[in-house]
Amino acid sequence: MEHLEHPAHVSVLGLKFVLPHPAAVMSQWAEVRPLVDGRDVLEEIHPEGVSSCSRRSLFRPVEEWPFAALDEPRKVELSSNDCVTACCGGVFVTIRRRGERVVWSGWQNTEDVRAPVPADVHFDAAQYNAELVRAAADVSWEEPVDSIARLLTLELAEADCFERWDCDVLSIRPQRAGSPRVEVYFGRRGAAWSPGSTFVHELPAAGGEPAVNVVRRFVRMVTDNDPRETARST
């Protein structure tokens, strides 16, 4: 069995949600930013970047969350420049669970390889995992557009309203610029992309109506009628 020497300092993980700038290109989902002992490490080492983990990432199974700590080491992209990291670089770290500890090691900053990066960080595994669960359940920060996007994502994962029309949901996108809204992109199941083959419905998020009512009405509409008849093609 591997012998582990516990470090003198064990850090505490925190996760906070930050709403993106309305002009953000890659995603309008809220950023999930890691805090190490209360410090926003991305702000310290990549102040112009945005977190590569968003609220959307937390709808996956727990073991697929970006910050999930598994026995097998995983290289995780922590931040980008609101662009593809292969183009503009970003910050990466290797995350691994080692017994009662979670270790973040092998930090890389591919935007600026000369910039200093943190030393290895060790967390208590129980506290670490509890923080992941807490963050996934936290909705206290949400604006109406976030609530609608979250509830719609969960509802459409369970409902078969699009499948009955031989369609698949392609993406759900909260949009903050202009009038806040949630866009639902969909297309015919298995069809290759071509101009006009993708459709979008927009759900307004600025009218003050409870998010659950907005979502229920949309699901009921798609259940009763072919959504392509009232959607905009793209």
Image: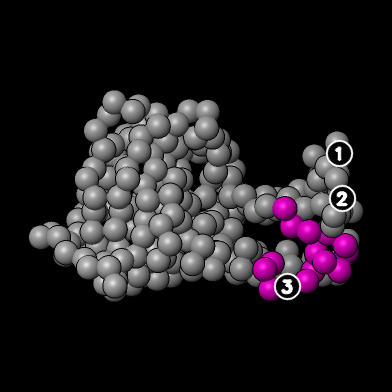
Q: Position of residue 134 (x, y in %)?
A: 37, 70
The residue that disc 1 covers is 194
Helix, strand, or loop for circle 1?
A: loop
Residue drawn at point x = 33 percent, y = 28 percent: 113
Q: Which residues are magenta?
A: 156-170
Percent across and percent down for residue 6 are 16, 65
Three-letter amino acid code at the position of disc 1: Ser
Secondary element under disc 3, as helix, strand or loop, is loop
Q: Classify the position of the N terminus by image quarter.
A: bottom left
Query: Dot 1, crowdedness within 10 Å: few (<14), some or many (≥20)?
Result: few
Question: Residue 52: x and y, percent?
Answer: 46, 45
Which image quadrant for residue 112? top left
Disc 2 is placed on an element classified as loop
Please tell me which residue is depicted at 33% across the width and 58% down the height of the picture: 15
Q: In the picture provided, is 109 more to the left or to the right than 52?
A: left
Residue holding disc 2: 191
Q: Residue at x 39, y 29 (%)?
A: 111
Reading the image, the residue beneath label 3 is 159
Residues tagged 1 and 2 counted as in contact (Cβ below 8 A): yes
Name the kind of residue labelled 3 in the image.
Answer: Ala
Q: Residue at x 62, y 63 (%)?
A: 153
What is the C-alpha distance between the residues marked 1 and 2? 9 Å
Whether residue 120 can be seen here: yes
Front position among marks 3 and 1: 1
| For marks 3 and 2 on the same chain, the one whose residue lies earlier in the sequence | 3
Image-quadrant location for residue 43: top left
For the residues labelled 3 and 1, the Cα–Cα distance comes to 27 Å
Mark 3–mark 2 distance (CA, rounded to whole Å): 21 Å
